Amino acid sequence: MIKVLIADDEPRIRRGIRNIINWEEEGFKLIGEAEDGEEALFIAKEKKPDILLLDICMPFINGIQLIEELNNILYNPVVIIISGHDEFNYAQAALRLKVFDYILKPIDRNNLRNLILKAKEEVISRIKLNERESFKDMVLENNLSYLKEEFFKAWLNGKLDKNELKIRMENLKIHYSDNMGLILIKISEKNFVGIVNKNERELISYGIINLSNEFMSSFTDLYVFRYSSTRVVILCNVESIIIWKKALSDLEEKISSLFKIDIIVENSLLNKNPMEIKEVFSKLKNNVLEKSKKTPIVLEVEKYIKKNYGDEKLSIEKLSNKLGISQTYLTRLLKKELGMNFIDYLTHVRIQNAIELMKDPSIKIYEIASLVGYNTQHYFSNVFKKNVGMAPNDYRVGMNNEE
């Protein structure tokens, strides 16, 4: 039903308009009558009429002022003004405010009835136009998501030159800061055993996208998109490396537990130059490929160490007990698939994470030592120098000089 409000300070005029048409039979609902502008505004705010028949000259708030207010609170109302001959200047002002039409007093019943029916057609026309515009916005939004996804794929694969990258970033409103991080989430193919339907397979990746957007909503410049049916990519600004790494660990755990699937997650901080993202992404893809060739036990070991390398008491004994296998078997398996024993692999993970943390100048070396599982800075420095070839402070200076 199309809602109608009548506003006129003369009861006789209001009564005449009320009786001029069978409102319900013609598809209208008469939602109220007002004897002055203030009352009309109150009713309009509360009941949101589609059509308003307004006297141009009313107490408190005149028709012109009322129309101005209505344009602020109603979406595209259809306004018919009622005017006396001596108020014609007011009527002209009202037309400038885009009222639908006006009618002069004394009111001709047939003319007003026809005008109300024309106003009904106008309301229906505006509703349809609004629906079309809403549909266009929806299509544009969907197309924008698609364009962004295609842009990210082209960028990650190095298919854009510097100028094209800059232009497309500006057009799509993609912001690349000096402290971006890149994450690749790979859904294990074994999760899809028995799932033939393509839509069912893709539902998992879209579920991961939605969860990642929600879980990492506190990160600025956050972009989450589907690289393929089994790979999701996250790009975001990293203000704190410690918070970022904790969020990644928690996200990985959340995805695995919520969707009951096996995933491989690789990540890296990015350089200030966005053109170098291809090399970083290629490295992440290769890391994922290598991990996908490993046995489930070794993958479990890698995940556990990745999450707990900061525990200075982490040992092969603790790990083998957790996995329910012997230390001898675990040692042999790690040597075979990783090419190193438990201590060497744990040290490798700790050193790599220490190097990543060094990129944040606010974190002191002694804090890094503690964060990666060493109880003293001296011990950490010795291990770091033995594996990297220089002391942590010297390495950090070299990193800064390279930048």
Image (cartoon, rainbow, N blue to C red):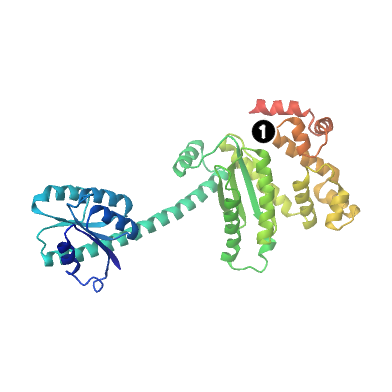
Q: Which quarter of the picture shows residue 13?
A: bottom left
Q: Height in image: 401 above or below 184?
A: above
* Residue 3 or residue 215, whichever sits in front: 3
Locate residue 306, reporting x and y percent. Answer: 75, 47
* Residue 359 or residue 295, whichever sits in front: 359
User: Which residue is at 11% across, 62% downward?
Assistant: 107
Locate residue 357, reporting x and y percent. Answer: 70, 36
The tally of labels here is 1
**182 displayed left or right of 306:** left
* Residue 1 or residue 339, whichever sits in front: 1
Whether residue 63 appears in this view of the structure is yes
Q: Height in image: 358 above or below 76?
A: above
Question: Quick one: quadrant of the C terminus?
Answer: top right
**239 displayed left or right of 163:** right
User: Which residue is at 64% across, 52% downward?
Assistant: 185
Question: Quick one: quadrant of the N terminus?
Answer: bottom left
Whether residue 188 appears in this view of the structure is no
User: Which residue is at 54% across, 47% downward?
Assistant: 152
Estimate how packed mark 1 is, as few (under 14), some (14 to 19) or many (20 or more) residues with alpha carbons within 10 Å.
Answer: some
**161 displayed left or right of 69:** right
Q: Secondary structure at mark 1?
A: loop
**104 displayed left or right of 208:** left
**In the image, what residue type sits under mark 1?**
Asp
User: Which residue is at 88% across, 50% downward?
Assistant: 317
Locate residue 396, reporting x and y percent. Answer: 71, 28
Residue at image mark 1:
360
Q: Which quarter of the picture shows residue 310?
A: top right
Q: Height in image: 98 above or below 124?
A: above
Locate residue 91, reporting x and y percent. Answer: 15, 50
Q: Height in image: 320 above or below 402?
A: below
- Outermost residue toward the right? 328
